[in-house]
Image: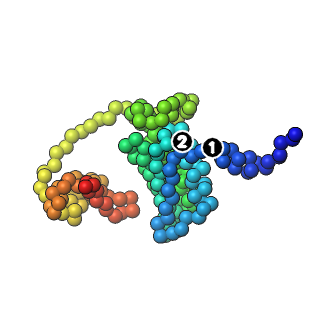
Amino acid sequence: MSRPTLKLSERAAARHAAKVLTMKITVYGKQMTVRESLKSVIEKKLMKFDKFFGEETEAIITCKARKGVKILEITISYGGATFRSEEESDTFITALDRAIESLERQIRKNKTRLEKMMKQGAFVIEAEDDDEFEEEEDFSIRMKTYPPKPMSPKEAILQMNLLGHAFFVFCDDETNETCVVYKRKDGGYGLIVPEN
């Protein structure tokens, strides 16, 4: 009995079908519709992270286009940790490749700290590539204090800009909650508030 001859792309598809993706992947388009072909490429490329993460991993991919630039953001949540990368390019595939490289660098750079929460044996597979990534040494933590004067988010943004910082922690004058304002890559501002 002879085996059927498969073309190269059919063989690759058969290999992909045999692998089961453990990560739950959700792909969104901001003010756009993401094609099924792009969703398929994203799922295939994210399979490489299965060696690091367990079954309860969730990945959210957001695609958006702004002034001809394609922007792809990957956020992976696993074991209480969040890994995030956002990349821009002229194509979504290039942005995806760059975002994946960035996430791999984050994981390898912090591998000792992450080994306790990552999938068993996650770093054994890639041991020969470790020379490529220099692991970050112990954190050097500098403590600062801030006046607990309640203020509005707009006033906090003003304070942040006056100090020349990328973020500012403050006490919201309406809710009395500790909040954070930060400068976004797109030039806008963000506000982080506690979840109730």
Mark 2 burial class by Cα count in 10 Å: few <14, some 14-19, many 20+:
some
Pointer 1 and pointer 2: residues touching (CB < 8 Å)?
yes
In the rendered image, the quadrant that contains the N terminus is top right
For disc 1, the marked residue is 19
x, y percent for residue 155: 19, 63
| Residue drawn at point x = 26 percent, y = 37 percent | 141
* Structural distance between the alpha carbons of marks 1 and 2: 10 Å
x, y percent for residue 83: 42, 46
| Residue drawn at point x = 29 percent, y = 35 percent | 140
| Residue drawn at point x = 51 percent, y = 58 percent | 27
x, y percent for residue 56: 46, 44
Q: Judging from the image, what secondary structure is the residue with disc 1 in?
A: loop
Q: Could you say which is closer to the camera, residue 126 or residue 14?
A: 14
In the rendered image, the quadrant that contains the C terminus is bottom left
Q: Is 32 left or right of 8, judged from the image as shown?
A: left
x, y percent for residue 23: 51, 47
Q: Which amino acid does the dot numbered 2 rest on? A: Asp
For disc 2, the marked residue is 50
Q: Could you say which is closer to the camera, residue 131 or residue 9?
A: 9
* Residue 85 showing in the rendered view: no
Mark 1 burial class by Cα count in 10 Å: few <14, some 14-19, many 20+:
few
